[in-house]
Structures are given as C-alpha cells and as structure tokens.
Amino acid sequence: MCGRDAALTKARIEGSELDVCPACVRFGKVIATPQAPRFARPQQLQKQNSEELLSVVDDYWQRIRQSRERLDLTQEDFAKKVAEKHSLMQKIEAGSNRPSIALARKLENLLHIKLLVTIPGSAEGLNTAKNKSAGFTIADFIKTKKET
C-alpha cells in the first residue's frame, strides 16, 4: 500500500487481498506470508569491485544456443548439466529470460563462451538509481499532503 521496499505479507484489507509491508499489515488481517519466487527477476548488473559492474551481453541467447548445438546437446540434457529447470533454459534460449550473473558464470564455464561484460563507471550512481523510485507512490502523496 505504501510502496515501501520490504518483505511483503499477504493480508485482507477491506475485502481485498493485498501484499503489504509489515507496517501496513496492521490495517487488515494477515492471510499468509508469501514465499519468494524461485525464479525472481534476473539480476542484470552486479558489482565486481567499487569501480566496475558486470552485465550479461545482449545476444546471450544466440551464444548459448549456438554453443549448446555445437556440443550436440538437447535442451533437456543441457538443463540437466547446468542443474536448472528445462523450462528456464528454454526461456533463456528464446531470449525472453535473461540469466542471472551466477547462472551466466556457470554457463560460461560449461560452454566456454563469454556472456558477462564489465561496465566501467561509478557503482554509486547505480545504487542511488536503484533505491530511488522513478514513480510517485501513495506514500509520496501522503507525505506531500501532510506537509501542506
């Protein structure tokens, strides 16, 4: 409800089921604490050190598919070798799901290809952009309303 970035709990508030932060759960009745999804949104950038960031290349899906085919592996066999679900590997090869940094490293080692690139620059700029919400939340509106 408030837009706070915190662990969410499912609660029934005025007849609606919502995922709310611990502070907003007091407005309703707790239904359940949701489990974190197994395949959360993949991490596109990761700090390597204070000055550099890692990112997965844009044509990752083509490189992965070509290397897998070169090794004469089916998608199912490939998924077993990587120890990931077959459906995830299908989505990655289709280009609809970008692999995480950890999975990209695993794929680089198995396929002997380059999937990660270093982005030189300030890591501080990324952290402030990630923490600062681009949109206007209800909490921002409430704060603005109270100030006036």
Image (spheres, rainbow, N blue to C red):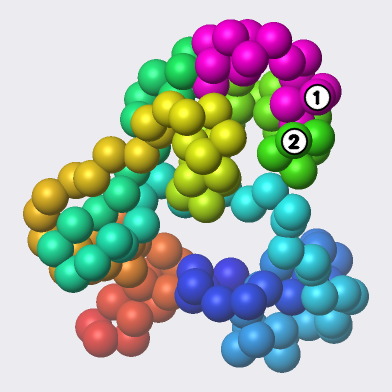
Q: Quadrant of residue 132?
A: bottom left
Crowd class of label 2 (few under 14; some 14 to 19; many from 20; radius 10 Å) = few
* Residue span colored magenta: 64-79
In this view of the protein, which residue sits in the foreground, 63 or 72? 72
What separation in Å lies between label 1 and label 2 (alpha carbons)?
6 Å
Is residue 96 something one can see in this rendering?
no
Q: Where is residue 103 shown, x and y percent of the image?
A: 56, 45
In the picture provided, is 16 more to the left or to the right than 48?
right
Q: Residue at x 56, y 44 (%)?
A: 106
Q: Point out the residue furthest to the right here.
A: 31
Q: Can you say whether 118 is above or below 113 in the image? A: below
Q: Quadrant of residue 87?
A: top right
In this view of the protein, which residue sits in the foreground, 97 or 4? 97
Q: Can you say whether 89 is above or below 147 in the image? A: above
Mark 1 = which residue? 77
Q: Amino acid at mark 2?
A: Lys
Mark 2 = which residue? 81
Q: Residue at x 84, y 81 (%)?
A: 30
Residue 75 counted in the magenta span: yes
Residue 144 counted in the magenta span: no
Q: Can you say whether 28 is above or below 137 in the image? A: below
Q: Where is residue 50 shown, x and y percent of the image?
A: 18, 69
Quadrant (top left/top right/bottom left/bottom right) for the C terminus: bottom left
How many marks can you see?
Answer: 2
